[in-house]
Image: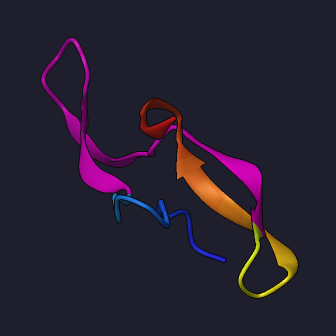
């Protein structure tokens, strides 16, 4: 499963690490995600979804 927030749709960004001598190497800026258990009353089941910290 990819690291995408299932509520807001945010995903990782790609950027550069910049050293003191200004050399650039690729890196990823990951989203602050964790798994949260949701219970859906209509369907009568629970699901584990990826969620961002600030969406609580």
- In this view, 56 is above or below 10: above
- How many discs mark residues in the rendered view? 0
* 4 with respect to 24 (left or right): right
Which is more toward the observer, 28 or 17?
Answer: 28
* 31 with respect to 9 (left or right): right
- Identify the residue shown where x is 52% and y is 35%: 56
Which is more toward the observer, 21 or 8?
Answer: 8
In the picture as drawn, the residue positioned furthest to the bottom comes out as 43
Q: In which quarter of the image is residue 49?
A: bottom right
- Identify the residue shown where x is 62% and y is 59%: 50
Percent from the top left, x then y, of residue 38? 75, 60
- In this view, 14 is above or below 47: above
- Identify the residue shown where x is 34% and y is 58%: 10
Which stretch did the figure color magenta? 12-39
- Identify the residue shown where x is 35% and y is 65%: 9
- In this view, 55 is above or below 10: above
Percent from the top left, x then y, of residue 22? 12, 24
The verdict on residue 45 being magenta is no
The verdict on residue 25 being magenta is yes
* 49 with respect to 32 (left or right): right
Report the magenta stretch's main SS.
strand
Q: Quadrant of residue 18?
A: top left
In the picture as drawn, the residue positioned furthest to the top comes out as 20
* 29 with respect to 46 (left or right): left
Percent from the top left, x then y, of residue 20? 21, 11
Which quarter of the image is occupied by the N terminus?
bottom right
């Amino acid at each position: 499963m990819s690291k995408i927030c299932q509520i807001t749709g945010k995903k990782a960004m790609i950027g550069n690490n910049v050293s003191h001598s200004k050399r650039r190497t690729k890196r990823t800026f990951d989203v602050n995600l964790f798994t949260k258990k949701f219970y859906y009353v209509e369907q009568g089941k629970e699901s584990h979804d990826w969620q961002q910290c600030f969406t609580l």
